[in-house]
Amino acid sequence: MNELTALREATPQPAPLSPAVRLAARAALMDEIAGHGTPHRARRPARRRTWLRAGVGMVAVAAACATAVVVAEPDPAGAPASSVDLVAFAPATFPFTLDPPPAGLQPSYSADPGREPGTTQFNAGWSAPESEDSLSITVRPNEPDLEDPTDEQDVTVQGHDGQLATENLTYGTEDGGTEIRPREVLVIEWSDDQWVTLSGQGRFDDRDQLLDTADTLSPTPVDVGLSVGLAPAGWSIYAYKNGTILTLANDDAPQQTLSVSLPGAPIPADQLLSQLMSPTGPVIDVDVQGSPAQLVPVDTGYTGPGGNAGWYLQAQLPDGQTFVVQAPGAFTQQQVLDLADQVTIAG
């Protein structure tokens, strides 16, 4: 039982959150993942570590009773754009596939942002309920910094240099102490700017199994689900998670972001203004992908180029799935609609 499960079972359940708050919490979770990583882990100094940047997402949760608001926090980077040009954008992908995939396990995908453009870390995990087996693969542009590695062994994987090691992870305990949990890990330098790390539990916490699995790696991208067919020129993937949220960032000003997400339920059109924290105008009835949609101008809290202007769009895919686009004021109203017309979900 993990900490969240224990908390749910040991404490009274609160009143259900509104769809807007659930949406905000999902985006805030993405920032939490990006900013803090695994809790209670003690890390040694980095060699070429990719530092992760927190607090730059477009959505935040103010309090349990608060409603959603689009925000863009300041960041020491270049000046955000005051306008954008939309261009064709490739689907969001994880850069490798396993052929064959791990038997009996289901994949999930995420991407965590780096401090600099082009340093996003891509993650894939395979697991299944009631199974002790799990596999994790990360792809990053620089060499990973293993924690207290021992028993290091040079290997070759599909013609690429690699290293097997026992990584000795330090975790905090409930009584305030620490404990060491060793795990086997395989690091492969696939190319100069592409490092692949494999680790796992159960049958995958084994050096021979990791090597056998690495032999099935194929540099064939797999579509991770939620994608946009249009995006601003000069923007790239900042983060995504399990096909439920996709965030793009301006390469020259990473604090300027665009998010597309799948809320748990749509907000009734007549409740949008009361659910959003900072609308600056009325609900605009529009058409997206052949269905009615609602567009609301909002105050992003950002004071740079474009002022505080921003957009919140609630729309539907042809199959009825609701999605939300949150865009900065650099977008025109028509550009928000054009982008939303190209939102898709693979599979």
Image: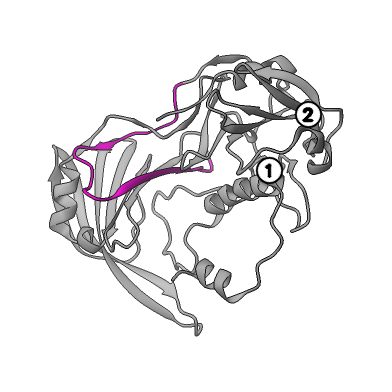
User: Image quadrant of residue 293?
Assistant: top right
Q: Is residue 48 above or below residue 345?
A: below
Q: Is residue 272 above or below residue 22?
A: above
Question: Which residue shows up at 74% across the image and 26% down it?
Answer: 294
The region drawn magenta spans: 90-115
Question: Which residue shows up at 29% across the image and 44% down it?
Answer: 196
Indicate left or right for 301 with 50 as reference.
right
Q: Nearer the viewer, mark 1 or mark 2?
A: 2
| N-term mark: 1 or 2 | 1
Q: Quadrant of the C terminus?
A: top left
Q: Quadrant of the N terminus?
A: bottom left
Indicate left or right for 257 with 147 as reference.
right
Residue reaching furthest to the bottom: 175
| Residue at the disc numbered 1 | 59
Q: Name which residue type carries label 1.
A: Val
Q: Name which residue type carries label 2.
A: Val
Pick the front one: 17 or 310? 17
In space, the residues marked 1 and 2 are separated at their CA atoms by 15 Å
Question: Do tag 1 and tag 2 residues touch (Cβ < 8 Å)?
Answer: no
Mark 2, Cα crowd under 10 Å, few <14 / some 14-19 / many 20+, is many
Q: Which mark is residue 296?
A: 2
